[in-house]
Amino acid sequence: MTDFFKFEADFVDSLRCVPMQVRCNLDTCGIKLKLSDWNQMTTAERQALVEFPCTTETEIQSYREHIQQLILQRTGILATKLPIEPHPAWLDSSTVPPSIKEKAQEIGVTLTQQNWAALTPLQRFALIKLSRSGHESKNFPIAIAEFNLL
């Protein structure tokens, strides 16, 4: 499944940045991918990472092995492994993470549990990523609007 958000429109045609779909897969399989590593990949390799499924345990393992091999081929360095969250917040539709509520309130939006539950896991993932400190948060309000949460 290929899902791109409107707030990613300025780079998805060229895939010059890592789209949320791939970032979610990376978090799911526990691999860190630097933008510099991403940019060493061909467009076809990047597109394959977008389309490669990463939901079941078998798919997650295959994705992990594929991305590890690709990073090694392109950089000569082993991929950095990340801890895998056993119960990621983006898969929990019953609880809005406090950080998301706070970030939404900063822009005058009250995010309810019903709003959160109505989002797809990928939309929840995007909001979590866009709300983190140190992340360029200009896309958070754009995503809130795109996801009809105003």
Image (tube, grey):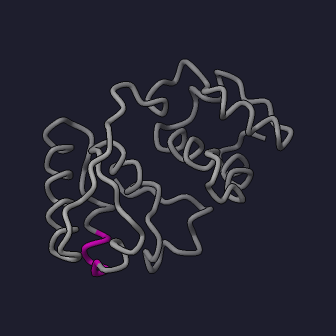
Question: Residue 46: which quarter of the image?
Answer: bottom left
Magenta-colored segment: predominant secondary structure:
helix
Question: Residue 112: which quarter of the image?
Answer: top right
Q: Please report the residue visible at 27 percent of the width from the left and 49 percent of the height from the top.
A: 81
The residue sitting at the top extreme is 94
Tell me: 102 left or right of 99.
right
* Residue 116 x/y as whole percent: 61, 29
* Residue 149 x/y as whole percent: 72, 39
* Residue 102 x/y as whole percent: 74, 33
Q: Please report the residue visible at 70 percent of the width from the left and 43 percent of the height from the top.
A: 148
Q: Which residues are magenta?
A: 41-47
Give above or below for 80 relative to 83. Answer: below
Tell me: 116 left or right of 51.
right
* Residue 18 x/y as whole percent: 43, 65
Question: Residue 37: which quarter of the image?
Answer: bottom left
Give above or below for 112 relative to 63. Answer: above
Give above or below for 29 relative to 50. Answer: above
Q: Please report the residue visible at 55 percent of the width from the left and 47 percent of the height from the top.
A: 129
Q: Please report the residue visible at 65 percent of the width from the left and 59 percent of the height from the top.
A: 136
Is residue 35 part of the magenta span, yes or no? Answer: no
